[in-house]
Amino acid sequence: MCLEDVRTLHQFNCICQDMAMWLSMIETQLNIEINLKDMANLQNLIKKNQMLGHDIQSHERHALDINIMSEEMVSNEHYDSENINHKQTQLNTRYEDVKVQQDQRHEHLQYCQQINTVIREINEREVWVDDRLRFLHLATSPRDLVATDTLKKKLARLEAEIIMYEDSIQETSIMCEKCRHGNDDIILVKEMTTLMDNLLVKWEGLKRDCEEKHDKVDQTRAFYSWLLDVGEEKAWINEKIKSLNLDGTRDNLPAVNRLLKKYDLLGRELDTHNQHIDTVIMAAGTAIIELRTPHSIEVDEHMRELKESVGVLYNICAAHKACLTDEAAHLNFNWKAEAIEVFITQKERHVLTEDVGSDLTSCEVLIARHNNYTTSLNSFKDNIDSLTTLKDS
């Protein structure tokens, strides 16, 4: 072996040694453990892996040089061909292996990043759902119609948000399914799948709770609307009960008749209100009770109290009207009796007179007047009979 051959062999060994050291460094970096849950670390590893890819590509020329030199040296037959071929094959194998490893690592890092992106989206969706669930669970039962309408508006907005957010949940679920396909044995995929399943459970729970809350608010609103109607009827009844009294002027028949007309009008108004209570309020109250809502017992009590109040007002009206009817009959009797008494008194003055006439003319006048009195007495007998009938009644 001449000096030139020694120099060539030394140069080949140096190149192979450099290549082996470089491959060892690349292999070490490719075997660094990946923290699958650290997005920042994943992005950093992706960048580093891209740089490794560029480095590997740039060393392709070195691998080619080694192959050319080894082939020349083997063909020269001045060197240990077996040893040279072994080094060449070993370096080529290692170089091809790092190329494959770098590609696989790149795909794996991209896949892990995609999974972490899905997990991050799942967590964001879960925060959104938890926030709405918290609102539903903390929303207290309204205590009046205004608060009920306010809560109803909030629920309407929430329902609109849920409808709009449905697409986001579906998109995340589709992305999760794509990442999961054929990789269920990977720990990170299992974690992602578990999170997605929990999210879907919460999502269905949110929709169900929102619907149930909406139904309860509708029931509460129906109750408070019904209660408002009941309150108006009770207020009307109480007002009429307070206004009904017999302390007004009843010392003459016209005043009593005016009061009777007032009670007739009140009776017609009471019939109208009672019809509204039976056909509207009682029907709505019965419907609320049949739904077995939390207000059912209270509704039943209000219905009973309302009917009792109506009965009280009917009884008071009937009692007062009967009293006024008796009063009117009594005053009418007195009036007729006074009129008859005045008539009789007037007639008695003429009948009891001692004047029998002083001549024929005056006698004829007295006779004519007496006949007139007799006629008027006979016609007035009907008034006396009607007075007797009134007294008996």
Image: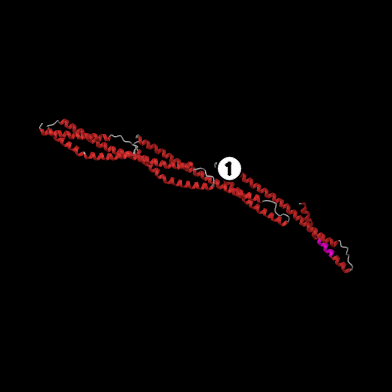
Res. 301 visible in picture: yes
Give the residue pinned by disc 1: 298
Residue pictured at 84% horizontal, 65% vertical:
369
**Dividing the picture into quarters, in which one does residue 117 lie?**
top left
Q: From the top left corner, tell me how far across and down residue 161 is, in percent.
A: 43, 46
Look at the image and tell me whether residue 111 can be seen: no
How crowded pointer 1 is (Cα within 10 Å; few <14, some 14-19, many 20+) is rated as few
Q: Position of residue 74 (x, y in %)?
A: 14, 33
User: What residue is rendered at 57% in x and 45% in y?
Assistant: 285
Q: Where is the N terminus found, in terms of image quarters?
A: top left
Q: Is residue 4 above or below residue 322?
A: above
Residue 42: quadrant of the picture = top left
Among the 4 quarters of the image, the one containing residue 265: bottom right
Bounds of the magenta segment: 369-376
Furthest-left residue in this view: 2
Residue 196 image point, x, y percent: 39, 39
Secondary-structure class at tag 1: helix
374 in the magenta segment:
yes
**Residue 87 position (above or below residue 312):** above
Q: How is the image coloured?
A: secondary structure
Q: Residue furthest right?
A: 358
Q: Main secondary structure of the magenta part?
A: helix
Amino acid, disc 1: Glu
**Percent from the top left, x then y, of residue 328?**
73, 54
Residue for point 87% across, 68% down: 362
Q: Nearer the viewer, residue 65 or 304?
A: 65
Question: Relative to residue 366, is residue 149 drawn left or right?
Answer: left
| Residue 87 drawn in magenta | no
Q: Residue at image x 21%, y 32%?
A: 90
